[in-house]
Image (cartoon, rainbow, N blue to C red):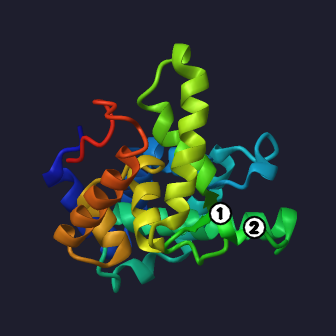
Amino acid sequence: MVDSSSNVSLEDRLRKGDPDALAELLSMHRERLHRIARFRMDGRLQGRIDPDDVLQEAYLAAAQRLKHFAGRDMSAFVWLRLIVGQTLIDIHRRHIGAKARDAGREIPIHGFGGGEQTSSASLAQALMGSITSPSQAIVKDELAVQLAEVIDQLEPIDREILALRHFEELSNQEVAEVLEIQQKAASIRYIRALKRLKSKLHGNPDFGNAE
């Protein structure tokens, strides 16, 4: 559990350009940033690029941009997430170039430059993975296909909210900050999207327990 007073102090130091504060904050949020790098990485790079290498490159980039954080109206975590996203885009361009992808079933990453995306099918699998057991594998796969179809029909911002909440495991407050909308609006959109998805899960009680 992160001590809020300590976190605020670190953010104050970061805004003053303290490199030690950057190292401490990166260590504090490392697990979450690692998860984001792993989920947002293009599948073609899986096994070739380690998320730890992404974070190391992101750390060096953040160190060079410390002065920019002072003028940004965002939390340290959201800023670090942005740096990680920009680093991923650079890595993707270096390794696989700007190859076209099927945009019809993909979700743009807000704040990541729109260059890298997460498929609706992958998001559906992630949602299903948290609510089904291995013994339900066949049902899970069938429902995942249905969920992907529903996700495709959602507004882009709603698809992105689902990705932020279920892929990156951001809080509602962080989602609102990333998308630059009110927390209430983020919560309403999240619950509305869950209701549409829940209709495909035949009343599964473990799905859709929004905060």
- Residue 198, percent across and down? 36, 45
Inspect the image, locate mark 2, and give the three-letter code of the amino acid beneath it. Answer: Asp
Q: Residue at x 43, y 43 (%)?
A: 200
- Residue 106, percent across and down? 63, 64
Regarding residue 76, the answer to whether it shows in the image is yes
Q: Crowdedness of circle 1 by 10 Å Cα count: few (<14), some, many (20+)?
A: some
Inspect the image, locate mark 1, and give the three-letter code of the amino acid beneath it. Answer: Arg
Q: Quadrant of residue 46?
A: top right
Q: Residue furthest bottom?
A: 71
Q: How many labels does the image show?
A: 2
Q: Crowdedness of circle 2 by 10 Å Cα count: few (<14), some, many (20+)?
A: few
Q: Residue at x 48, y 19 (%)?
A: 133
Front residue of this view, candidates 131 and 59: 131
Q: Which residue is drawn at 34% across and 65% down?
A: 76
Q: Which residue is label 1 attached to?
A: 105
Q: Residue 102 carries which label?
A: 2
Front residue of this view, candidates 176 and 193: 193
Tell me the quadrant of the picture where the N terminus can be found: top left
Regarding residue 34, the answer to whether it shows in the image is no
Q: In which quarter of the image is residue 139?
A: top right
Is label 2 in a helix, a strand or a loop? loop
Front residue of this view, candidates 13 and 208: 208
Above or below, 114 relative to 120: below
Disc 2 and disc 1: Cα gap in Å?
6 Å
Is label 1 in a helix, a strand or a loop? helix
Above or below, 82 relative to 54: below
Q: Residue at x 22, y 65 (%)?
A: 188
Above or below, 126 relative to 87: above
- Residue 53, percent across and down? 68, 49
Q: Residue 187 carries which label?
A: none
- The answer to whether residue 203 is left or right of residue 42 is left
Cβ atoms at labels 2 and 1 below 8 Å apart: yes
